[in-house]
Amino acid sequence: MESYAKALLYAIPFFIVLLAVEILYGYFVKNQKHKVLDTVSSISSGLTNIVKDSLGLGVIIVTYPYLLEHLAITEIKASWLVWLVAFIVIDFAGYWNHRLSHHINFFWNQHVIHHSSEEFNLACALRQSISNLIGYFPLLLIPAALLGVPHQVIAILAPIHLFAQFWYHTQHIGKMGWLEYLIVTPSQHRVHHAINPEYIDKNLGQILCVWDRWFGTFQEELEDVPPQYGVLKPAATWNPILINFQHIWRLIKDAWRTHSIADKLRIWFMPTGWRPRDVREKYPMSKIENVYDFKRYETPASKAFKGYAIFQMLTTLALLLFMFYNYGAIGFQGLLLFGAFVFLGIYGYTSLMDRDRYAVWLELFRALAGLGFIGLTGDWFGINAYIPAGSLLVATYFFVTIFGGFYFTYFEKEPKTSQSATY
């Protein structure tokens, strides 16, 4: 996990730079594809994901090294061939994992967060799951294990393969000629994120688009069908932690409400969106009918409030970068506590973005807990060793959090503009 944290230490600033470039480009060409609160929500979602993954939270059904030890029938010796086979197998497995996530009720819960943004930009690429607590992906790598692909190769290629899926989440790049027949492009991925009937559940490939073409899930972006983004049952919140568990909460309620024992069991493995008949009739659920005419989620947000949301997100990002830099010295128990502060913080300020009245008390609790921790230890997880009076800066941040929570809940007048304004 420490090596993964070190990789993130370099990857995160790279992603943020690309995000800044996209935002600035949209500003200068007067074609902005970012909205402040949506982008803050997306980046915050990415922060929860990397905390969860860097701490190894979850249960792995079976590890790849175990499969390799018990299933390998040969071993690829040529170094270039090892990397090529590993890449193809990972991408093939990624396609089927992605396809499962779109077609099975239970698996959709771990993927819905990625589609929850009603915008399409580089920030929405960072909407990654924290609800994938049961790791089954190694099972899809059985072909690699049979061929004897070393686990070190898989360990190196897997995060690279994931990071390489970032760039094509943009509306500023059109079709790319002959590359459209080889790799996943922005045009193809716009189709994937769209909720238009023509585009639903299409283009499931991650790097190579050949799988979609071979298995019948490819759809070209059509000039007369502009993609509309989001999910058919809108998330209606900026809080990424809530979005992660919305779908499974619906499944739990439907499984409880249905009178059919069979439906209580099979609802989890039925196609995405399936509901028992008795529940569907008694508890109808609304969804978007006209993708070209629906109310997109927004909350009142003055310029000051948008600035405060950005401040909270950037401060959380800075604290996380420190955590990754000092990962080994903090220790596992300290990392769990640090991660809890991050999760609580993101839950707090994104609830404030939703204008939930309870958010201020959550922010107050978080700030007081943080100040208490600094008071008891005289430090913030060892930050004073790197930044003189670093814990004082963190304490100041917590005081700002208390002030901001109360000010934007009780004192700021109703803003004249709303979230629909872009950067």
Image: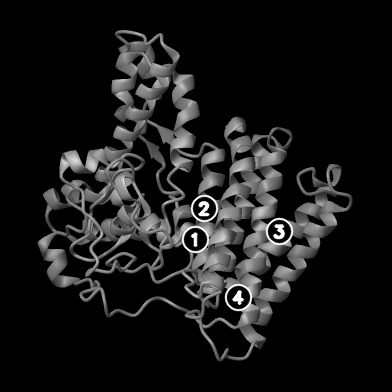
Q: Are marks 4 and 2 in contact (CB under 8 Å)?
A: no
User: What amino acid does circle 3 point to?
Assistant: Ala
Question: How would you rate the neighbour count of disc 2 (Cα within 10 Å): few for under 14, some for 14-19, many for 20 or more?
Answer: many
Quick one: quadrant of the C terminus? bottom right
Is tag 2's residue or tag 3's residue first in the polypeptide sequence? 2
Q: Amino acid at mark 4?
A: Lys
Examine the image and state in which quarter residue 253 appears: bottom left
CA neighbours of label 4 inside 10 A, class few (<14), some (14 to 19), many (20+): many
Query: Which percent across, then down, holds residue 174?
Result: 37, 59
Per the image, the residue denoted by label 4 is 306
The residue carrying mark 1 is 42
Which x, y percent locates residue 29? 51, 72
Circle 3 SS class: helix
Cα–Cα span, label 1 and label 4: 14 Å
Mark sitting earlier along the chain (3/1): 1
Neighbours of disc 3 within 10 Å: few (<14), some (14-19), many (20+): some
> What kind of element bears circle 4?
helix
Q: Are marks 2 and 1 in contact (CB under 8 Å)?
A: yes
